[in-house]
Amino acid sequence: MSIAGRFSRLVTSPIKHHVYVSRSSDVALNLSIEHYLFQRSHPASTVLFLYVNKPCIVIGTNQNPWFEVNHALTRRNAASLDSFSQRDEPVPKDEIRVIRRRSGGGTVFHDLGNVNFSVIFPLVDKIVNYKHAEMVVRAIRKTNPRARVNHRHDIVLDPGPLLDESDWPDSHDTRRTAYAFDNGELEPRKISGSAGKASGPRGLHHGTCLLASPNLASISKYLCSPAAPFLVTKAAPSTPSPVANIISQDTPKPTTSMLQQQIIDAFIQMYNIDTTKLSLPHESDTALQNNKHCATGTLDHTLLEIPEIRSGCTEIQSPEWLYEQKREFTLSSHPSNAHPTLPDWFPPSARIHLVIKSGLITSSSISLSRHPSIAASEAVKFNAVLQNTRIIKLDSFRRLLDEGVSVDGAKQRRDIYRVGAWLDWMLLGHEVDVRMANK
């Protein structure tokens, strides 16, 4: 029997506990394996799945990618990022991938210094239990004793000085540490964000662990969209938090595989799993194994032989899945609820307002003139070109408007160029040639 066939049989079997580690760093494959485990694992089983991804950005299922991500930055050469790899993988040369996962929560940045965990479990009273964040804290504390779970089920590091011994909490308390919450200058730093979902009898809790990301200084840049101030959306926004790595100058320096092993140990201890005659997963182990109580093994691209995983991989990599979700939003150069700063080259008399739903421009109002009657006439012309346009099918707003909107005079033609360039920047992630925009 093939590895994929045996994996499918193990997952659906009544074996109570499962531990799997992915050897792939492909975010689409790993999220699709996770989704397969969530949908197909036995209702009474509890599954731990661990993986590490190449640099990518993962948004929540209820989020707006234009609001969350700096697309212009993701399209630059990803080789500008620093590399952290114990897998002898090359630094990526292509753009940083943006993927929409199937669970809620906020937007996160993954790289090869970040360990991802996922626990799938029987659902009790239709409530997702975040107790597995406490399990992960127990593992992290083998490296950094400052780790704890906060009120949002995130894992943070307390940066303050060591407390008096009389104020130390019980060593099993995962909500408090022996360190002060802050040091007068720094607030707790997040090292792990998590999200959950529930469906039928199954719950899922997954999250990140910033072990040794070399890109901490870059994360906020990638997760700061220049379009966000100009958008009005009901999509769930992320909650920005200061972040840190688990590893510091004062801690041991475990590898990602070592942290994975520590999380596996904490999982086994938490559920008192009998691992007799089992070799637990590690990087060089490709075998799937099981006894009466536990199934374990390492996973890779061979699981694409499973139709559900292959189709799931195709789906979440598609631009339709990422951009054509049903929530409506508006993009306005002059939003009524705020006064964001426009670039110097933006035409001072221009006004832009687009209504977008399912990635489709359902209506638009664009004008260049200050005179109401002329502006109204211009809006009709622009709307005739833009209405019912699918954004993912566009190469350039600038080219579309230049070819589709007829105007008289060099100034109006220049203003159309600038309006198109601004829309390219906001919605397509094209960086603006300022010299051309200023001509």
Image (cartoon, rainbow, N blue to C red):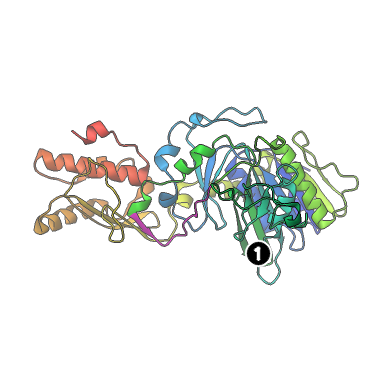
Q: Is residue 238 magenta?
A: yes
Residue 363, given in percent of the width and then of the height, sits at: 28, 59
Q: Residue at x 78, y 36 (%)?
A: 285
Position above or below: 104 against 225: below
Numbered circles on residues, count: 1
Foreground: 287 or 227? Answer: 227
Q: Is label 1 in a helix, a strand or a loop?
A: loop
Q: Residue at x 67, y 53 (%)?
A: 148
Q: Quadrant of residue 46?
A: bottom right
Provide the residue designation for mark 1: 128
Residue type at numbered disc 1: Val
Residue interval drawn in magenta? 231-242
Residue 196, given in percent of the width and then of the height, sits at: 61, 59
- Residue 172 visible in the snapshot: yes
Q: Is residue 398 left or right of residue 60?
A: left
Foreground: 234 or 258? Answer: 258
- Residue 298 visible in the snapshot: no
Foreground: 168 or 176? Answer: 168
Position above or below: 56 against 41: above
Residue 83, given in percent of the width and then of the height, sits at: 58, 30
Q: Is residue 411 left or right of residue 159?
A: left
Quarter containing the C terminus: top left
Q: Main secondary structure of the magenta part?
A: loop
Dot 1 crowding, Cα within 10 Å, few <14, some 14–19, many 20+:
many
Q: Is residue 41 magenta?
A: no
